[in-house]
Amino acid sequence: MSRVHLLISRLAFAVILLLVAAVPLVFCHAFDNAFRETKFITIWTLSAVLGLAFAASGTLRLPKMVLLALGIHAALMTQSLIGAVHPGRGLSYLMEQLSMLVLLPAGASFVSSPRRRGLLLATLLLAADAVLLIGVAQLEGRDPVGTGLVSGLPVSTLGFKNLAAQVYLLAGVLAASQLILTPRSYWPAAFLATTFFLMLLGVWLMRSRSAFLGLVVGLATVVIVARWRRGRASTMRRLLMPTATGLVIAGAVTLVSVRAQEGPRSFARPPPWQTVEATATLNTRLIRWHNSLRMVLDHPVRGVGLGNFRVHYPRYGVDDPEQTGSRNVHEAHNEFLQVLAETGAVGLAGFLALLIVVARALHGAALRAETEPEQRDLSLSCLGMLAGILTQTVFSFALRNPTPPVWLWTCCGAALSAPAVSRMTRLRSGVRLVACVLLAALFAAYASVSAKASQMTAAGAAALGQGRLEDARALFERASLHPNADRALLNLCYVEGRLGRRAAAVSACRRALARQPNNHIIHDQLARQLQSAGLYQEALFHYERALTTDPELTRARIERDKLLKLLSK
Protein backbone atom coordinates (compact mmCIF):
# COMPACT_ATOMS: atom_id res chain seq x y z
CA MET A 1 0.00 0.00 0.00
CA SER A 2 1.32 3.41 -0.93
CA ARG A 3 2.16 5.99 1.69
CA VAL A 4 -0.56 8.33 0.35
CA HIS A 5 -3.25 5.65 0.69
CA LEU A 6 -2.09 4.82 4.19
CA LEU A 7 -2.22 8.51 5.10
CA ILE A 8 -5.80 8.75 3.79
CA SER A 9 -6.80 5.65 5.77
CA ARG A 10 -5.31 6.84 9.04
CA LEU A 11 -6.66 10.39 8.76
CA ALA A 12 -10.12 9.10 7.87
CA PHE A 13 -10.02 6.75 10.84
CA ALA A 14 -9.05 9.63 13.13
CA VAL A 15 -11.97 11.67 11.79
CA ILE A 16 -14.38 8.76 12.36
CA LEU A 17 -13.28 8.34 15.97
CA LEU A 18 -13.42 12.06 16.71
CA LEU A 19 -16.80 12.28 14.99
CA VAL A 20 -18.13 9.50 17.19
CA ALA A 21 -16.75 11.12 20.33
CA ALA A 22 -18.30 14.47 19.32
CA VAL A 23 -21.76 13.10 18.45
CA PRO A 24 -23.29 14.14 21.82
CA LEU A 25 -21.96 17.67 21.31
CA VAL A 26 -23.28 17.90 17.77
CA PHE A 27 -26.68 16.86 19.09
CA CYS A 28 -26.46 18.95 22.26
CA HIS A 29 -29.66 20.94 21.57
CA ALA A 30 -31.74 18.09 22.88
CA PHE A 31 -35.35 18.91 22.20
CA ASP A 32 -34.68 20.61 18.89
CA ASN A 33 -36.06 17.70 16.86
CA ALA A 34 -37.34 19.99 14.10
CA PHE A 35 -33.91 20.05 12.44
CA ARG A 36 -32.98 16.52 13.48
CA GLU A 37 -33.38 14.95 10.03
CA THR A 38 -30.95 17.39 8.44
CA LYS A 39 -28.36 16.74 11.14
CA PHE A 40 -28.62 12.99 10.61
CA ILE A 41 -28.15 13.42 6.87
CA THR A 42 -25.10 15.61 7.50
CA ILE A 43 -23.54 13.06 9.86
CA TRP A 44 -24.00 10.09 7.54
CA THR A 45 -22.96 12.03 4.43
CA LEU A 46 -19.67 12.85 6.14
CA SER A 47 -19.34 9.18 7.09
CA ALA A 48 -19.95 8.18 3.46
CA VAL A 49 -17.14 10.47 2.31
CA LEU A 50 -14.84 8.85 4.86
CA GLY A 51 -15.99 5.43 3.65
CA LEU A 52 -14.79 6.35 0.16
CA ALA A 53 -11.45 7.27 1.68
CA PHE A 54 -11.23 3.77 3.16
CA ALA A 55 -12.08 2.32 -0.25
CA ALA A 56 -9.21 4.30 -1.77
CA SER A 57 -6.87 3.00 0.92
CA GLY A 58 -7.67 -0.61 0.05
CA THR A 59 -8.53 -1.67 3.63
CA LEU A 60 -12.14 -2.71 2.95
CA ARG A 61 -12.01 -6.49 3.28
CA LEU A 62 -15.26 -7.91 4.70
CA PRO A 63 -16.73 -11.44 4.36
CA LYS A 64 -18.79 -11.85 1.18
CA MET A 65 -21.87 -13.03 3.11
CA VAL A 66 -21.82 -9.87 5.21
CA LEU A 67 -21.60 -7.69 2.10
CA LEU A 68 -24.47 -9.64 0.48
CA ALA A 69 -26.66 -9.27 3.59
CA LEU A 70 -25.87 -5.55 3.69
CA GLY A 71 -26.96 -5.13 0.08
CA ILE A 72 -30.24 -6.99 0.60
CA HIS A 73 -31.02 -5.03 3.77
CA ALA A 74 -30.24 -1.73 2.03
CA ALA A 75 -32.55 -2.57 -0.88
CA LEU A 76 -35.45 -3.62 1.36
CA MET A 77 -35.11 -0.56 3.58
CA THR A 78 -34.90 1.82 0.62
CA GLN A 79 -38.08 0.50 -0.99
CA SER A 80 -39.90 1.21 2.28
CA LEU A 81 -39.41 4.94 1.65
CA ILE A 82 -41.92 4.80 -1.21
CA GLY A 83 -45.09 6.58 -0.14
CA ALA A 84 -43.58 8.05 3.03
CA VAL A 85 -45.83 10.73 4.53
CA HIS A 86 -42.81 12.57 5.94
CA PRO A 87 -39.89 11.99 3.50
CA GLY A 88 -37.36 13.80 5.69
CA ARG A 89 -38.14 11.68 8.74
CA GLY A 90 -38.19 8.51 6.66
CA LEU A 91 -34.83 9.39 5.13
CA SER A 92 -33.29 9.96 8.56
CA TYR A 93 -34.55 6.54 9.70
CA LEU A 94 -33.11 5.01 6.53
CA MET A 95 -29.73 6.59 7.26
CA GLU A 96 -29.82 5.21 10.80
CA GLN A 97 -30.78 1.71 9.68
CA LEU A 98 -28.13 1.68 6.94
CA SER A 99 -25.37 3.23 9.02
CA MET A 100 -23.55 -0.09 8.93
CA LEU A 101 -23.03 0.35 5.17
CA VAL A 102 -20.42 2.96 6.02
CA LEU A 103 -19.40 1.99 9.52
CA LEU A 104 -18.74 -1.73 9.05
CA PRO A 105 -16.12 -1.01 6.37
CA ALA A 106 -14.81 1.96 8.35
CA GLY A 107 -13.91 -0.36 11.19
CA ALA A 108 -11.51 -2.14 8.85
CA SER A 109 -8.97 0.57 9.65
CA PHE A 110 -8.28 -1.27 12.90
CA VAL A 111 -6.23 -3.75 10.86
CA SER A 112 -3.71 -1.03 10.00
CA SER A 113 -2.85 -0.33 13.63
CA PRO A 114 -1.88 -2.53 16.58
CA ARG A 115 -5.19 -4.08 17.61
CA ARG A 116 -4.49 -4.04 21.30
CA ARG A 117 -3.81 -0.31 21.21
CA GLY A 118 -6.90 0.17 19.03
CA LEU A 119 -9.07 -1.64 21.56
CA LEU A 120 -7.87 0.58 24.38
CA LEU A 121 -8.43 3.67 22.21
CA ALA A 122 -11.97 2.55 21.39
CA THR A 123 -12.74 2.02 25.07
CA LEU A 124 -11.25 5.39 25.97
CA LEU A 125 -13.35 7.23 23.37
CA LEU A 126 -16.49 5.34 24.37
CA ALA A 127 -15.92 6.35 27.98
CA ALA A 128 -15.33 9.97 26.88
CA ASP A 129 -18.54 9.81 24.88
CA ALA A 130 -20.46 8.73 27.96
CA VAL A 131 -18.96 11.53 30.07
CA LEU A 132 -19.85 14.10 27.39
CA LEU A 133 -23.45 12.93 27.51
CA ILE A 134 -23.56 14.00 31.14
CA GLY A 135 -21.49 17.17 30.80
CA VAL A 136 -23.41 18.70 27.91
CA ALA A 137 -26.73 17.96 29.59
CA GLN A 138 -25.49 19.76 32.70
CA LEU A 139 -24.52 22.78 30.57
CA GLU A 140 -27.99 22.82 29.08
CA GLY A 141 -29.62 23.08 32.49
CA ARG A 142 -30.69 19.46 32.84
CA ASP A 143 -29.50 16.92 35.38
CA PRO A 144 -29.23 13.36 34.03
CA VAL A 145 -27.31 11.98 37.00
CA GLY A 146 -29.34 13.60 39.76
CA THR A 147 -26.57 15.77 41.18
CA GLY A 148 -29.07 18.42 42.19
CA LEU A 149 -26.92 21.14 40.60
CA VAL A 150 -29.64 21.98 38.11
CA SER A 151 -33.24 20.98 37.66
CA GLY A 152 -34.42 18.59 35.00
CA LEU A 153 -35.06 15.02 34.00
CA PRO A 154 -32.63 12.09 33.95
CA VAL A 155 -32.21 12.29 30.18
CA SER A 156 -29.42 12.31 27.67
CA THR A 157 -28.56 15.02 25.18
CA LEU A 158 -31.21 13.84 22.74
CA GLY A 159 -34.00 14.33 25.23
CA PHE A 160 -34.29 10.75 26.47
CA LYS A 161 -32.21 8.66 28.82
CA ASN A 162 -31.98 5.64 26.50
CA LEU A 163 -29.13 7.05 24.42
CA ALA A 164 -26.84 7.54 27.40
CA ALA A 165 -27.71 4.12 28.84
CA GLN A 166 -26.96 2.44 25.50
CA VAL A 167 -23.54 4.09 25.30
CA TYR A 168 -22.82 2.91 28.86
CA LEU A 169 -23.96 -0.60 27.87
CA LEU A 170 -21.59 -0.83 24.89
CA ALA A 171 -18.63 0.67 26.74
CA GLY A 172 -19.24 -1.59 29.74
CA VAL A 173 -19.31 -4.76 27.65
CA LEU A 174 -16.23 -3.69 25.67
CA ALA A 175 -14.20 -2.82 28.78
CA ALA A 176 -15.22 -5.89 30.81
CA SER A 177 -14.66 -8.30 27.93
CA GLN A 178 -11.16 -6.92 27.32
CA LEU A 179 -10.45 -7.27 31.01
CA ILE A 180 -11.68 -10.87 30.98
CA LEU A 181 -10.12 -12.06 27.74
CA THR A 182 -6.66 -10.47 27.53
CA PRO A 183 -4.10 -10.33 30.36
CA ARG A 184 -2.76 -6.79 30.61
CA SER A 185 -0.29 -4.83 32.66
CA TYR A 186 -1.42 -2.93 35.73
CA TRP A 187 -2.36 0.46 34.25
CA PRO A 188 -4.38 -0.79 31.24
CA ALA A 189 -6.16 -3.27 33.50
CA ALA A 190 -6.91 -0.53 36.03
CA PHE A 191 -8.25 1.70 33.26
CA LEU A 192 -10.53 -1.05 31.94
CA ALA A 193 -11.79 -1.95 35.41
CA THR A 194 -12.51 1.71 36.19
CA THR A 195 -14.32 2.15 32.87
CA PHE A 196 -16.49 -0.89 33.53
CA PHE A 197 -17.38 0.33 37.02
CA LEU A 198 -18.26 3.82 35.74
CA MET A 199 -20.40 2.39 32.94
CA LEU A 200 -22.23 0.17 35.42
CA LEU A 201 -22.78 3.24 37.59
CA GLY A 202 -23.99 5.15 34.52
CA VAL A 203 -26.65 2.54 33.75
CA TRP A 204 -27.76 2.73 37.36
CA LEU A 205 -27.96 6.52 37.31
CA MET A 206 -29.98 6.47 34.08
CA ARG A 207 -32.55 4.21 35.77
CA SER A 208 -32.55 1.99 32.66
CA ARG A 209 -33.57 -1.55 33.51
CA SER A 210 -33.40 -2.67 29.88
CA ALA A 211 -29.82 -1.38 29.50
CA PHE A 212 -28.78 -3.25 32.64
CA LEU A 213 -30.38 -6.42 31.28
CA GLY A 214 -28.49 -5.89 28.02
CA LEU A 215 -25.22 -5.44 29.94
CA VAL A 216 -25.78 -8.73 31.77
CA VAL A 217 -26.67 -10.59 28.56
CA GLY A 218 -23.68 -9.12 26.71
CA LEU A 219 -21.21 -10.15 29.40
CA ALA A 220 -22.86 -13.56 29.77
CA THR A 221 -22.38 -14.08 26.02
CA VAL A 222 -18.70 -13.21 26.30
CA VAL A 223 -18.18 -15.52 29.29
CA ILE A 224 -20.05 -18.47 27.74
CA VAL A 225 -18.23 -18.30 24.39
CA ALA A 226 -14.91 -17.73 26.15
CA ARG A 227 -15.39 -20.94 28.15
CA TRP A 228 -15.39 -22.90 24.88
CA ARG A 229 -11.74 -22.04 24.51
CA ARG A 230 -10.97 -22.16 28.21
CA GLY A 231 -8.25 -24.72 27.68
CA ARG A 232 -6.04 -21.81 26.69
CA ALA A 233 -7.21 -19.56 29.54
CA SER A 234 -4.61 -18.24 31.93
CA THR A 235 -4.94 -18.02 35.69
CA MET A 236 -5.65 -14.30 35.40
CA ARG A 237 -8.59 -14.97 33.10
CA ARG A 238 -9.99 -17.55 35.52
CA LEU A 239 -9.84 -14.96 38.28
CA LEU A 240 -11.17 -12.06 36.23
CA MET A 241 -14.27 -13.86 34.92
CA PRO A 242 -15.81 -14.51 38.34
CA THR A 243 -14.75 -11.03 39.44
CA ALA A 244 -16.60 -9.37 36.57
CA THR A 245 -19.60 -11.66 37.10
CA GLY A 246 -19.61 -10.76 40.78
CA LEU A 247 -19.59 -7.05 39.93
CA VAL A 248 -22.60 -7.53 37.66
CA ILE A 249 -24.47 -9.51 40.32
CA ALA A 250 -23.61 -6.88 42.94
CA GLY A 251 -24.87 -4.19 40.61
CA ALA A 252 -28.10 -6.10 40.05
CA VAL A 253 -28.67 -6.50 43.77
CA THR A 254 -27.99 -2.79 44.29
CA LEU A 255 -30.22 -1.81 41.41
CA VAL A 256 -33.17 -3.84 42.61
CA SER A 257 -33.06 -4.06 46.39
CA VAL A 258 -31.08 -1.19 47.94
CA ARG A 259 -33.27 1.71 49.02
CA ALA A 260 -31.13 4.82 48.79
CA GLN A 261 -32.00 8.20 50.15
CA GLU A 262 -34.57 10.22 48.24
CA GLY A 263 -33.00 12.09 45.31
CA PRO A 264 -33.45 15.74 44.33
CA ARG A 265 -36.97 17.01 43.86
CA SER A 266 -36.10 17.86 40.27
CA PHE A 267 -36.28 14.17 39.37
CA ALA A 268 -39.50 13.63 37.44
CA ARG A 269 -39.02 9.84 37.22
CA PRO A 270 -39.02 7.79 40.45
CA PRO A 271 -36.10 5.42 41.10
CA PRO A 272 -36.39 2.00 39.44
CA TRP A 273 -36.95 0.13 42.69
CA GLN A 274 -40.41 1.70 43.04
CA THR A 275 -42.50 -1.14 41.67
CA VAL A 276 -45.51 1.06 40.91
CA GLU A 277 -43.53 3.10 38.37
CA ALA A 278 -41.86 0.01 36.96
CA THR A 279 -45.20 -1.73 36.55
CA ALA A 280 -46.71 1.35 34.89
CA THR A 281 -43.82 1.51 32.42
CA LEU A 282 -44.16 -2.18 31.58
CA ASN A 283 -47.92 -1.85 31.19
CA THR A 284 -47.43 1.04 28.75
CA ARG A 285 -44.96 -1.08 26.77
CA LEU A 286 -47.41 -3.98 26.63
CA ILE A 287 -50.20 -1.68 25.41
CA ARG A 288 -47.94 -0.22 22.73
CA TRP A 289 -46.72 -3.62 21.56
CA HIS A 290 -50.31 -4.85 21.31
CA ASN A 291 -51.34 -1.78 19.31
CA SER A 292 -48.28 -2.12 17.07
CA LEU A 293 -49.18 -5.74 16.35
CA ARG A 294 -52.63 -4.60 15.27
CA MET A 295 -50.93 -2.19 12.87
CA VAL A 296 -48.78 -5.07 11.58
CA LEU A 297 -51.84 -7.25 10.95
CA ASP A 298 -53.33 -4.48 8.80
CA HIS A 299 -50.07 -4.04 6.81
CA PRO A 300 -48.32 -7.43 7.06
CA VAL A 301 -46.15 -7.62 3.93
CA ARG A 302 -44.63 -4.18 3.24
CA GLY A 303 -45.60 -2.32 6.42
CA VAL A 304 -46.78 1.27 6.69
CA GLY A 305 -43.56 2.74 5.26
CA LEU A 306 -40.31 3.86 6.85
CA GLY A 307 -40.96 6.79 9.21
CA ASN A 308 -44.76 6.44 9.01
CA PHE A 309 -45.30 4.73 12.37
CA ARG A 310 -46.22 8.00 14.10
CA VAL A 311 -48.73 8.85 11.38
CA HIS A 312 -50.65 5.56 11.60
CA TYR A 313 -50.34 4.90 15.34
CA PRO A 314 -53.13 7.30 16.49
CA ARG A 315 -55.68 4.98 14.86
CA TYR A 316 -54.50 2.12 17.07
CA GLY A 317 -53.22 3.91 20.18
CA VAL A 318 -56.45 5.16 21.72
CA ASP A 319 -55.69 3.32 24.98
CA ASP A 320 -52.01 4.39 25.06
CA PRO A 321 -51.54 6.88 27.95
CA GLU A 322 -48.74 8.68 26.06
CA GLN A 323 -50.80 9.19 22.89
CA THR A 324 -52.58 12.55 23.12
CA GLY A 325 -54.20 14.97 20.73
CA SER A 326 -51.11 17.19 20.71
CA ARG A 327 -48.43 14.48 20.77
CA ASN A 328 -48.07 11.35 18.67
CA VAL A 329 -46.14 8.29 19.77
CA HIS A 330 -43.14 7.86 17.45
CA GLU A 331 -41.74 4.46 18.47
CA ALA A 332 -43.00 0.97 19.26
CA HIS A 333 -40.30 0.70 21.98
CA ASN A 334 -39.21 -2.56 20.37
CA GLU A 335 -36.74 -2.39 17.50
CA PHE A 336 -37.90 -5.60 15.86
CA LEU A 337 -41.58 -4.70 16.13
CA GLN A 338 -40.80 -1.22 14.78
CA VAL A 339 -39.05 -2.65 11.71
CA LEU A 340 -41.91 -5.11 11.20
CA ALA A 341 -44.55 -2.36 11.42
CA GLU A 342 -42.75 0.05 9.08
CA THR A 343 -41.19 -2.33 6.54
CA GLY A 344 -43.36 -5.43 6.89
CA ALA A 345 -42.35 -9.08 7.01
CA VAL A 346 -40.05 -8.58 4.02
CA GLY A 347 -38.06 -5.80 5.69
CA LEU A 348 -37.86 -7.67 9.01
CA ALA A 349 -36.55 -10.76 7.23
CA GLY A 350 -33.73 -8.73 5.69
CA PHE A 351 -32.95 -7.06 9.03
CA LEU A 352 -32.82 -10.38 10.90
CA ALA A 353 -30.76 -11.98 8.14
CA LEU A 354 -28.16 -9.23 8.46
CA LEU A 355 -27.98 -9.58 12.24
CA ILE A 356 -27.68 -13.37 12.01
CA VAL A 357 -24.94 -13.20 9.37
CA VAL A 358 -22.94 -10.66 11.39
CA ALA A 359 -23.40 -12.63 14.63
CA ARG A 360 -22.30 -15.90 12.99
CA ALA A 361 -19.30 -14.20 11.42
CA LEU A 362 -18.26 -12.74 14.78
CA HIS A 363 -18.78 -16.09 16.51
CA GLY A 364 -16.68 -17.87 13.90
CA ALA A 365 -13.88 -15.31 14.10
CA ALA A 366 -13.89 -15.56 17.91
CA LEU A 367 -13.38 -19.35 17.83
CA ARG A 368 -11.18 -19.74 14.74
CA ALA A 369 -7.77 -20.95 15.85
CA GLU A 370 -5.87 -19.42 12.93
CA THR A 371 -7.20 -15.93 13.70
CA GLU A 372 -4.71 -13.70 15.48
CA PRO A 373 -5.43 -13.47 19.24
CA GLU A 374 -6.25 -9.75 19.29
CA GLN A 375 -8.79 -10.16 16.48
CA ARG A 376 -10.38 -13.12 18.27
CA ASP A 377 -10.78 -11.04 21.41
CA LEU A 378 -12.23 -8.11 19.49
CA SER A 379 -14.68 -10.42 17.69
CA LEU A 380 -15.87 -11.86 20.98
CA SER A 381 -16.21 -8.38 22.51
CA CYS A 382 -18.30 -7.28 19.52
CA LEU A 383 -20.45 -10.40 19.78
CA GLY A 384 -21.18 -9.47 23.40
CA MET A 385 -21.92 -5.85 22.43
CA LEU A 386 -24.30 -7.03 19.70
CA ALA A 387 -26.09 -9.43 22.06
CA GLY A 388 -26.41 -6.74 24.73
CA ILE A 389 -27.73 -3.98 22.48
CA LEU A 390 -30.22 -6.32 20.77
CA THR A 391 -31.50 -7.38 24.19
CA GLN A 392 -31.99 -3.73 25.08
CA THR A 393 -33.81 -3.05 21.81
CA VAL A 394 -36.56 -5.47 22.82
CA PHE A 395 -37.67 -2.68 25.17
CA SER A 396 -36.29 0.39 23.38
CA PHE A 397 -34.86 1.66 20.08
CA ALA A 398 -31.06 1.58 20.31
CA LEU A 399 -30.38 1.28 16.57
CA ARG A 400 -32.41 4.45 15.90
CA ASN A 401 -30.15 6.57 18.09
CA PRO A 402 -27.14 8.35 16.57
CA THR A 403 -24.31 7.08 18.79
CA PRO A 404 -24.86 3.34 19.53
CA PRO A 405 -24.89 2.19 15.88
CA VAL A 406 -21.71 4.15 15.18
CA TRP A 407 -19.81 2.32 17.90
CA LEU A 408 -21.40 -1.07 17.34
CA TRP A 409 -20.95 -1.31 13.57
CA THR A 410 -17.50 0.30 13.54
CA CYS A 411 -16.19 -2.23 16.07
CA CYS A 412 -17.91 -5.12 14.26
CA GLY A 413 -16.30 -4.03 11.01
CA ALA A 414 -12.92 -4.01 12.73
CA ALA A 415 -13.49 -7.53 14.03
CA LEU A 416 -14.67 -8.93 10.69
CA SER A 417 -12.07 -7.26 8.49
CA ALA A 418 -9.53 -9.57 6.90
CA PRO A 419 -5.87 -9.15 7.90
CA ALA A 420 -3.82 -6.93 5.65
CA VAL A 421 -1.97 -8.74 2.88
CA SER A 422 1.31 -7.02 3.67
CA ARG A 423 2.50 -5.41 6.88
CA MET A 424 1.69 -1.70 6.79
CA THR A 425 4.25 0.86 7.75
CA ARG A 426 3.32 3.21 10.56
CA LEU A 427 2.83 6.89 10.05
CA ARG A 428 4.95 9.14 12.18
CA SER A 429 3.18 9.92 15.44
CA GLY A 430 3.57 13.66 14.91
CA VAL A 431 1.35 13.65 11.80
CA ARG A 432 -1.36 11.69 13.59
CA LEU A 433 -1.17 13.92 16.64
CA VAL A 434 -1.45 17.16 14.63
CA ALA A 435 -4.39 15.82 12.61
CA CYS A 436 -6.23 14.68 15.74
CA VAL A 437 -5.62 17.98 17.55
CA LEU A 438 -6.87 20.03 14.59
CA LEU A 439 -9.99 17.91 14.18
CA ALA A 440 -10.65 17.95 17.92
CA ALA A 441 -10.38 21.75 17.91
CA LEU A 442 -12.84 21.92 15.00
CA PHE A 443 -15.42 19.79 16.79
CA ALA A 444 -14.87 21.65 20.07
CA ALA A 445 -15.49 24.98 18.32
CA TYR A 446 -18.70 23.71 16.76
CA ALA A 447 -19.79 22.21 20.08
CA SER A 448 -19.18 25.49 21.94
CA VAL A 449 -21.30 27.41 19.42
CA SER A 450 -24.10 24.85 19.69
CA ALA A 451 -23.96 24.82 23.48
CA LYS A 452 -24.08 28.64 23.61
CA ALA A 453 -27.19 28.76 21.43
CA SER A 454 -28.77 26.03 23.53
CA GLN A 455 -28.05 27.92 26.75
CA MET A 456 -29.53 31.17 25.40
CA THR A 457 -32.63 29.31 24.21
CA ALA A 458 -33.04 27.71 27.63
CA ALA A 459 -32.60 31.11 29.32
CA GLY A 460 -35.18 32.61 26.96
CA ALA A 461 -37.64 29.84 27.80
CA ALA A 462 -37.12 30.54 31.51
CA ALA A 463 -37.72 34.27 30.97
CA LEU A 464 -40.85 33.45 28.97
CA GLY A 465 -42.12 31.28 31.80
CA GLN A 466 -41.63 34.21 34.20
CA GLY A 467 -43.54 36.59 31.93
CA ARG A 468 -40.49 38.67 30.95
CA LEU A 469 -41.39 38.80 27.28
CA GLU A 470 -38.89 41.47 26.21
CA ASP A 471 -36.00 39.62 27.85
CA ALA A 472 -37.15 36.38 26.28
CA ARG A 473 -37.39 38.02 22.87
CA ALA A 474 -33.84 39.39 23.15
CA LEU A 475 -32.43 36.00 24.15
CA PHE A 476 -34.25 34.14 21.37
CA GLU A 477 -33.10 36.76 18.85
CA ARG A 478 -29.47 36.30 19.88
CA ALA A 479 -29.79 32.50 19.83
CA SER A 480 -31.33 32.63 16.34
CA LEU A 481 -28.01 33.89 14.95
CA HIS A 482 -26.36 30.52 15.67
CA PRO A 483 -26.47 27.39 13.46
CA ASN A 484 -28.83 25.36 15.68
CA ALA A 485 -31.46 28.11 15.87
CA ASP A 486 -34.61 26.16 14.99
CA ARG A 487 -36.12 26.02 18.47
CA ALA A 488 -35.07 29.62 19.17
CA LEU A 489 -36.79 30.84 15.98
CA LEU A 490 -39.98 28.99 16.85
CA ASN A 491 -40.00 30.52 20.33
CA LEU A 492 -39.19 33.93 18.87
CA CYS A 493 -42.21 33.65 16.60
CA TYR A 494 -44.41 32.89 19.61
CA VAL A 495 -43.01 35.75 21.73
CA GLU A 496 -43.33 38.30 18.92
CA GLY A 497 -46.95 37.24 18.54
CA ARG A 498 -47.53 37.68 22.27
CA LEU A 499 -46.07 41.19 22.02
CA GLY A 500 -48.40 42.01 19.14
CA ARG A 501 -45.64 42.32 16.55
CA ARG A 502 -47.27 40.27 13.83
CA ALA A 503 -44.81 41.18 11.08
CA ALA A 504 -41.82 40.18 13.22
CA ALA A 505 -43.59 36.97 14.28
CA VAL A 506 -44.30 36.02 10.68
CA SER A 507 -40.70 36.82 9.72
CA ALA A 508 -39.32 34.56 12.47
CA CYS A 509 -41.62 31.72 11.41
CA ARG A 510 -40.57 32.10 7.79
CA ARG A 511 -36.91 31.92 8.81
CA ALA A 512 -37.61 28.72 10.73
CA LEU A 513 -39.60 27.33 7.79
CA ALA A 514 -36.70 27.99 5.44
CA ARG A 515 -34.59 25.66 7.58
CA GLN A 516 -37.23 22.92 7.87
CA PRO A 517 -39.88 23.23 5.11
CA ASN A 518 -41.84 20.11 6.13
CA ASN A 519 -42.09 20.78 9.86
CA HIS A 520 -45.74 20.71 10.89
CA ILE A 521 -45.18 22.65 14.13
CA ILE A 522 -43.67 25.59 12.24
CA HIS A 523 -46.46 25.53 9.64
CA ASP A 524 -49.03 25.53 12.45
CA GLN A 525 -47.38 28.44 14.29
CA LEU A 526 -47.01 30.45 11.08
CA ALA A 527 -50.64 29.84 10.19
CA ARG A 528 -51.75 31.19 13.58
CA GLN A 529 -49.72 34.37 13.14
CA LEU A 530 -51.02 34.88 9.59
CA GLN A 531 -54.57 34.31 10.79
CA SER A 532 -54.12 36.92 13.51
CA ALA A 533 -52.75 39.33 10.90
CA GLY A 534 -55.83 38.81 8.70
CA LEU A 535 -54.01 36.90 5.93
CA TYR A 536 -56.59 34.12 5.85
CA GLN A 537 -55.79 32.56 2.48
CA GLU A 538 -52.11 32.08 3.29
CA ALA A 539 -52.98 30.91 6.81
CA LEU A 540 -55.28 28.26 5.32
CA PHE A 541 -52.43 27.03 3.11
CA HIS A 542 -50.11 26.53 6.08
CA TYR A 543 -52.82 24.83 8.17
CA GLU A 544 -53.26 22.39 5.28
CA ARG A 545 -49.50 21.77 5.13
CA ALA A 546 -49.38 21.13 8.88
CA LEU A 547 -52.28 18.67 8.72
CA THR A 548 -50.77 16.87 5.73
CA THR A 549 -47.70 16.05 7.81
CA ASP A 550 -49.53 15.38 11.08
CA PRO A 551 -53.30 14.72 10.68
CA GLU A 552 -53.74 14.59 14.46
CA LEU A 553 -53.25 18.34 15.08
CA THR A 554 -56.68 18.95 16.56
CA ARG A 555 -56.41 22.71 16.99
CA ALA A 556 -55.05 23.18 13.46
CA ARG A 557 -57.99 21.22 12.06
CA ILE A 558 -60.47 23.34 14.02
CA GLU A 559 -58.89 26.61 12.85
CA ARG A 560 -58.71 25.37 9.27
CA ASP A 561 -62.42 24.51 9.30
CA LYS A 562 -63.20 27.98 10.66
CA LEU A 563 -61.23 29.60 7.86
CA LEU A 564 -62.92 27.43 5.23
CA LYS A 565 -66.33 28.56 6.46
CA LEU A 566 -65.20 32.18 6.59
CA LEU A 567 -63.73 32.15 3.09
CA SER A 568 -66.72 30.33 1.60
CA LYS A 569 -69.11 33.15 2.56
Image (cartoon, helix red, strand yellow):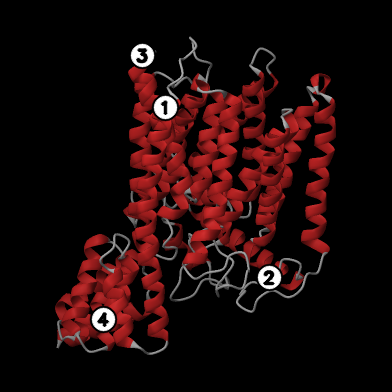
Q: Nearer the viewer, mark 1 or mark 2?
A: 1
**For mark 2, what is the residue?**
280
Picture residue at 60% right of the left edge, 34% below the top: 120
Q: Secondary structure at mark 3?
A: loop
Q: In percent of the image, x 66 and y 59: which residue is there?
A: 208
Callout 1: few (<14), some (14-19), or many (20+) C-alpha neighbours within 10 Å?
A: many
Type of amino acid under label 2: Ala
| Depicted 240 relative to depicted 482: above or below | above
Q: From what the image shows, is residue 545 above or below residue 425?
A: below
Q: Quadrant of residue 562?
A: bottom left
Mark 4 and mark 3 in contact? Answer it, CB < 8 Å: no
Q: Residue at x 77, y 60 (%)?
A: 255
Check contact, mark 2 vs mark 3: CB within 8 A. no
Q: Position of residue 69 (x, y in %)?
A: 49, 29
Q: Amino acid at mark 4?
A: Arg
Give the residue number, with chain letter if any, for mark 3: 2
Residue 10 badge: 1
Q: Which amino acid, mark 1?
A: Arg
